[in-house]
Image (tube, rainbow, N blue to C red):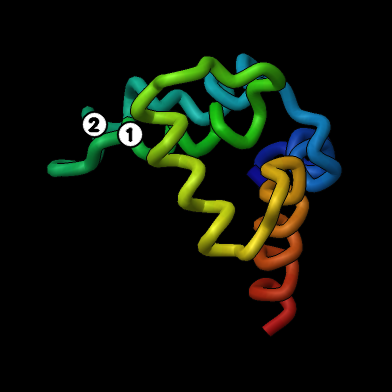
Amino acid sequence: MKSISPKLYADARKGLIDTDVVMNFMQFDKWENYVEHVSSEWHVNWWKYATVINLPENEDWVEQASSTLFTFNFRDRKYLLPHVASLMDNLQQM
């Protein structure tokens, strides 16, 4: 995303990206056609968790994706995208 669509990456870095825009850009539905044994379900759910404003209640995928907060020690999911973008920026500088 960073190299192909810098503006979209900048929006994601600020936490201002829309779920539909991400799904359109990432084209998760095509992933399984290109790489064997790759399920896009986890990636779809993570992006939805990070971008959907009003998450549905009592959905398994929401509970599973919320474990990301514990991984990064966040209380609020709004910090996920800026933090991950920051990690990507730091990797590029190495």
Query: How far across and down, in percent of the image, does residue 29 sit?
Result: 34, 21
Q: Residue at x 14, y 43 (%)?
A: 37
Q: Give the side of residue 81 with respect to residue 31, left or right.
A: right
Determine the CA span between mark 2 and mark 1.
Answer: 7 Å
Crowd class of label 2 (few under 14; some 14 to 19; many from 20; radius 10 Å): few
Q: How many marks?
A: 2
**Of labels 2 and 1, the one closer to you:** 1
53 over 72 or under it: above or below? above
Classify mark 2: helix, strand or loop. Answer: helix
Residue at the spot of label 1: 40
In the foreground, 67 or 16? 67
Q: Three-letter amino acid code at disc 2?
A: Glu
Query: How far across and down, in percent of the image, does residue 90 sit?
Result: 72, 74
Query: How far across and down, in percent of the image, does residue 23 sit?
Result: 53, 22
Classify mark 1: helix, strand or loop. Answer: loop
Residue at the spot of label 2: 32
